Amino acid sequence: MIETPSLVDQYCHGVLRTELGLGTFEAQLARTEGPPAPGTTLFDTQTGFAVRRWCPPLLGLEPHCPPARYLARRRELGVLEAGRRLLRGSGITTYLVDTGLPGDLTGPAELASAASAEAREIVRLELLAEQVADTSGTVESFLANLAESVHGAAANAVAFTSVAGVRHGLALAPEPPGPGEVRGAAGRWLAARRVGGELTDPVLLRHLLWIAVASGLPLQLHAGLGEPGLRIDRTDPVLLTDFVRATAGLGTDLILLHGYPYHRHAAHLAGVFPHVYADSGAALIRTGARAATILAEILELAPFGKILFSSGAQVLPELHVVGARLFREALARVLGGWVAEGAWSLADAQRVAGMVASGNAKRVYGLE
């Protein structure tokens, strides 16, 4: 049996502090632009089935129990106790938390306390820029405050993350924009923007990426499936190839998050470029019973020291559980199969499992 006693979740979000109704809970199981097909529910997805497989036993129910019974038990325990049981049952020992999502979500310290684990913050660049814009009156003050804010955040954060692919697409010009270009873009954005307005300007998104690269902290880049309405052809990680090449040798690691359904492209980039790493986890929540197939495809191309686990979970503690359980099961199935075939030794399989589950993340993020 392949053991992974310690899991470092290298990318996730907090969980909702308030009780959820059926519709709100269900909406988190699949990223859709509308309701499910008439007469069906979003529990009828790979994610929904995985929740019903792994989460009921942590709340004292049998696996695969009906959704209504599960949610009734959840309400009976209350959001805090149910969340505590679920998070502590996930087996995750360290959470790296992107605090950039809106909503009444737990921060790193609160998540760590509920889970009896450790947690560190990942700072979302675009939200940081929007917060700076809300309090900066001029272009000059915005750009100066932005540079200062990124520098200040780097002192405490474990990494930066960017949703440039979600906001614009990953086909950004690879080189840093010039000072005049940045000032012009900032002026246009600030003049047209209301307080709280999102940053979507490609010049400013590139400027943010390069400020983050200069910090030396690991930089996470969202790729593949994301929010509803997103054109996923714009989030293929292969579109980052020129940016990846431009950042080579600068001392900053790039982590390609999610990736699915382009996970092989992310794994390829991790195999070619020394400073690029591939995420192996978040795709597994979406693929459920097919998770071992997806993980095996990542292991085809990326060196084993370049693959990291994450759940990508948000809002529901159930997604942290499902991410961790599916990863562990998929890893044991894939590596255990190779051991059984005689292709790998058990010692090598166990060593690689430890690398992907936690060792690589501890090295990349300086968690040792």
Image (cartoon, rainbow, N blue to C red):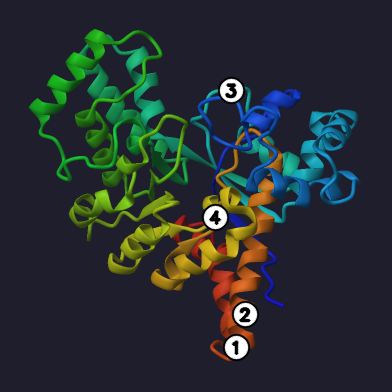
Labelled disc at residue 103: 3
Within the image, what quadrant is residue 368 found in? Answer: bottom right
Q: Image point 64% across, 86% down: which residue?
A: 340
Is residue 248 in view?
yes
Q: Is residue 66 left or right of residue 345?
A: right
Q: Calculate the distance from the C-alpha at mark 3 to the C-alpha at mark 1.
A: 48 Å
Residue labelled with disc 1: 341
For the residues labelled 2 and 1, say whether their Cβ atoms are less than 8 Å apart. Answer: yes
Q: Residues within 10 Å of mark 2 (few under 14, many from 20)?
A: some
State whether residue 151 is above or below residue 198: below
Give amino acid for label 2: Gly
Q: Calculate the distance from the C-alpha at mark 4 to the C-alpha at mark 3.
A: 23 Å
Task: Judge depth for marks 4 and 3 and give the one in front.
Answer: 4
Q: Calculate the distance from the C-alpha at mark 4 to the C-alpha at mark 2.
A: 19 Å
Is residue 350 in view?
no
Among the two numbered marks 1 and 4 on one chain, the one whose residue lies closer to the N terminus: 4
Q: Position of residue 363 (x, y in %)?
A: 47, 63
Labelled disc at residue 337: 2
